[in-house]
Image: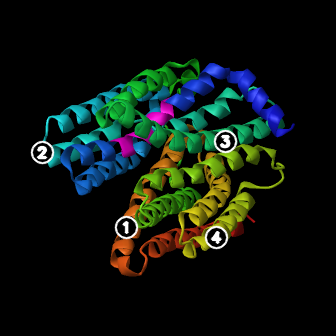
Amino acid sequence: MSAIDSYRALLRTVGPAYLAVAFLGRVPLAMSQMGALVLVSGVTGSYGLGGASAGSLAVANALGAPVFGTLADRYGQRWVVLGQSLAGGAGLVALVTAAEAAAPAVVLIGLSALAGLAIPQVGPLARVRWRPILAAETPERKRRLVDAAFSYEGATDEISFVAGPAAVGLVAVLVSPGGALVAAGLLLAAFGSWFALHETATLTRPVAGSSRATGRVLTGVLLVLAGAQFLIGVLFGGTQTGATVLATAEGQPGLAGLIHATLGIGSAIAGLAVAALPERISYATRLVVASGALVVLSAPLLLVDTIGSLVLVIGLLGFAVAPYMISTFAMAGTVVAPDRIGVAMTMLAGSTGIGYAVGSATAGRLADHFADSGGHTPAFAVTVTATCLALLLALALRWRSA
């Protein structure tokens, strides 16, 4: 079965409406972090407070993800995701109201954290649904279609994290920064709820009406995979910070978001192509190849000194990102019990968010410290270091599975 045939089969199985809803349901998460940064910094005049609000939202979301994943495994996704979508949407609107009312900093940071805690991780939860959706397929066909589904989900995640910040910028210009975050809240309440109520959510209910997930989740392999996703988060944070520093030095700070978006474009293209890989190539082998490509393609970041060269390097680097992430999520789905896949997927997503926070903070400190000698290069050194460590982890997993 070719990659195109696999994608057609997935489309026939769930229908285009589900794919659209699952995509739009994850966009608000991609909008919320930048939306909080733009709103709070614009209203208060403090980039530090804006960054703190955005950071608290991201970290709370990352820490809450496995908790809600556990609840989804125990009780099914429907009511868990529905409650999150409504609460998260309300939280984003509350943050806008508080910011425009000149609320104290502690209130803004606290509301950002509460909103982030509630926003569901639609991407990982959508991955959980594919195996039960395809349960009636033959084992060989199911493996092929699950691979295609995970490739599609990886590409969709990348597209959402390009579209989300772009939507924030567009609505902020046409309406207001607060309007952008309100739009994210309404989008979450509408499409997050639709995703929760979709008939596929019933497939995630515990087997035989059990209300308790009993399978083991914290295996050594899963913890290593969480570490691998933490490192890809560090890559995102270091790369975005380095791009911001270089763009600012070149007098084009507004281009930083667009420059970083090129990472997602290449990643989305590569993610869709992963479905064409032969089944005989194991996930562990794919992870080694992808992490090796990350090392090779990130190294030129240490040499860039213009926006043009940076766009080229980041665009190429993106082609290794999605294959890496698809491999980690797919492998996670095979190393935990079926009744704990939700918490496994959300744990990996949460690890990515924490890695992003650590990577951006570390790269920012290095950029400030070495500002006189070109702060973007030390920031990009965080990215390169993360890729080298990712390769070591991938080799360790490959050695263990050999």
- Whether residue 267 appears in this view of the structure is yes
Q: Nearer the viewer, residue 326 or 315?
A: 315
Q: Nearer the viewer, mark 1 or mark 3?
A: 1
CA–CA distance in space, label 1 to label 2: 25 Å
Left or right position of 335 against 368? right
CA–CA distance in space, label 2 to label 3: 43 Å
Numbered label attached to residue 155:
none
Considering the image in quadrants, where does the N terminus appear? top right
User: Which region shows up in magenta?
Assistant: 25-35
Amino acid type indicated by mark 2: Pro
Left or right position of 133 against 349? right
Circle 3 residue: 150
Does the segment drawn in magenta span residue 212? no
Amino acid type indicated by mark 4: Val
Numbered label attached to residue 104:
2
Circle 1 residue: 364
Kindly check if marks 1 and 3 are in contact, taking CB atoms under 8 A apart as contact: no
Q: Residues within 10 Å of mark 2 (few under 14, many from 20)?
A: few
Circle 4 — which element? helix
> Which mark sits nearer the N-terminus, 3 or 4?
3
Q: Residue at x 29, y 34 (%)?
A: 178
Tell me the chief SS of the magenta region: helix
Q: Nearer the viewer, residue 367 or 57?
A: 367
Left or right position of 395 against 310? right
Amino acid type indicated by mark 1: Gly
CA–CA distance in space, label 2 to label 4: 44 Å
Circle 3 — which element? helix
Considering the image in quadrants, where does the C terminus appear? bottom right
> Which mark sits nearer the N-terminus, 1 or 3?
3
